[in-house]
Image: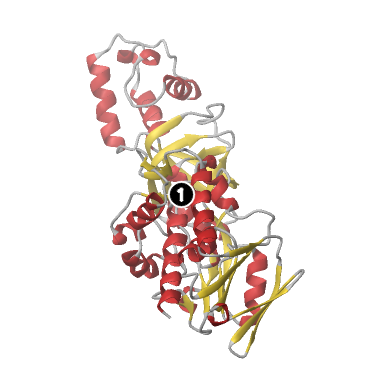
Amino acid sequence: MNLEKKKLVIIGGGAAGFFTAANVDGEKYDIHILEQASDVLQKVKISGGGRCNVTHACFDPRELTSFYPRGNKELLSVFTKFQPGDTMGWFEERGVALKIEDDNRIFPESNSSLSIMNALADAVIANGTKVSTKQVVKKIEQQGEQWIITTSSEEFTADIVVFCTGSSPKSYQLLKPLNFKIVDLVPSLFTFNIKNKSIEGLMGTSFPNAWVKLPALKKEESGPLLITHWGLSGPAVLKLSAWCARELFAMDYNFDVVVNFLGIDISIAEDTLSQFKADNPKKSIGQSKIFDITNRFWNHLLDINNIDPQKQLGNISNKEVQLILESLCQNKMQVKGKSTFKDEFVTAGGVDLKEIDFKTMQSKKYPNFYLAGEVLNIDAITGGFNFQACWSEAWLIAQDLNSK
């Protein structure tokens, strides 16, 4: 029986590679994962601060695609076949209890990525998958109907190859001799480096729903915002960095942003301040809780605008009101550079999506050569979406292989 099995080699022992192997029929295939590092599933391990943000609670495929700056059109058909609800079901059937957090990110109840890693490891052991680490692939060649994969120490023959190495430059060097079109890589999901007196010394201060605008690109995003040691972070910034990844790269990460810390129109903020001022004329401005911001941030804004915090609201001039409103709702800052968000090294770019048949994730050029994961020109904002693309693509590959 063993001789009748087709040889399947999966290059890359990450989320996409393991999920493909876990769902392939071990009776039909001799499955072998090759991983260049000494450990597998490293991104799964460190994701979400070691908790593994396995997916996101968004169960409408069309809505789900809106979280992907690149790949949203192609992923619609993929997500109609396997979406976050299916991911949850897969892991829960294998004994991993999951929880949906307030921001809709999904984690194992154990708060440990080991729960996810163990479920994947158990599944590949169960279908007889062989896993080889420290196998640095040097060359992939087509020989007749087979593939020859040469590593730093061995040579492997495969009937079918699944290529899911992630987005390292070495991966693309392997694909170039096969004439795959590669879209240049640029960073995505990064924070903005800003030196500005409005946020100086306020690291750790957060805002529940700010607006951040890129005037040069006419782009705006809203969401939580965080002041860091280096500048600004949080979902509002990360979404902008992802959607504008290519443009910001071209600008060499030097550009202006306009921040609205309140997330309300300046005219509404003006009405709110005027009403509070009229109702509390004798109250000192420094002690006034007018907006949903910290006292520390409020008093810092008064300080940089040279407004005495002891001054009674009734004595605040129109000019001082305008200074406060502009600092809160139209705060222009210069970004000079970027920083990596936590350990999320996400890139935009990769194998051109026109190369892939999204019904099966098979290469249009080469039958029996499949691609999945971050090697493709698909990326998402933070929140479990990049993993979901991996699970869904891997599922399609496994289903196609099992149907043969």
Whole-percent x, y for residue 29 in the image: 52, 74
Q: Going by the image, does 1 lie left or right of 134?
A: left
The quarter holding residue 9 reads bottom right
x, y percent for residue 113:
52, 44
Instruction: Work out whether 23 lies above or below 198.
Output: below
Q: Residue furthest right?
A: 153
- As drawn, which residue projects farthest toward the bottom? 144
Look at the picture and state if 119 lies above or below 178. above
State whether residue 369 is above or below residue 69.
Answer: below
* Residue for point 33% across, 19% down: 289
Which residue occupies 76% across, 69% down? 152
What residue is rendered at 27% in x and 35% in y? 267
Left or right relative to 366: residue 140: right
| Residue 97 seen from this side | yes
In the rendered image, is residue 247 in sight? no
Name the residue carrying label 1. Answer: 382
Colouring scheme, one of rainbow, by chain, secondary structure, one colour: secondary structure
Q: The residue under label 1 is which amino acid type? A: Thr
- Indicate the quadrant where residue 400 lies: bottom left
Q: Nearer the viewer, residue 106 or 70?
A: 106
Quarter of the rendering containing residue 225: top left
Q: Quadrant of the C terminus?
A: bottom left
Q: Nearer the viewer, residue 92 or 241?
A: 92
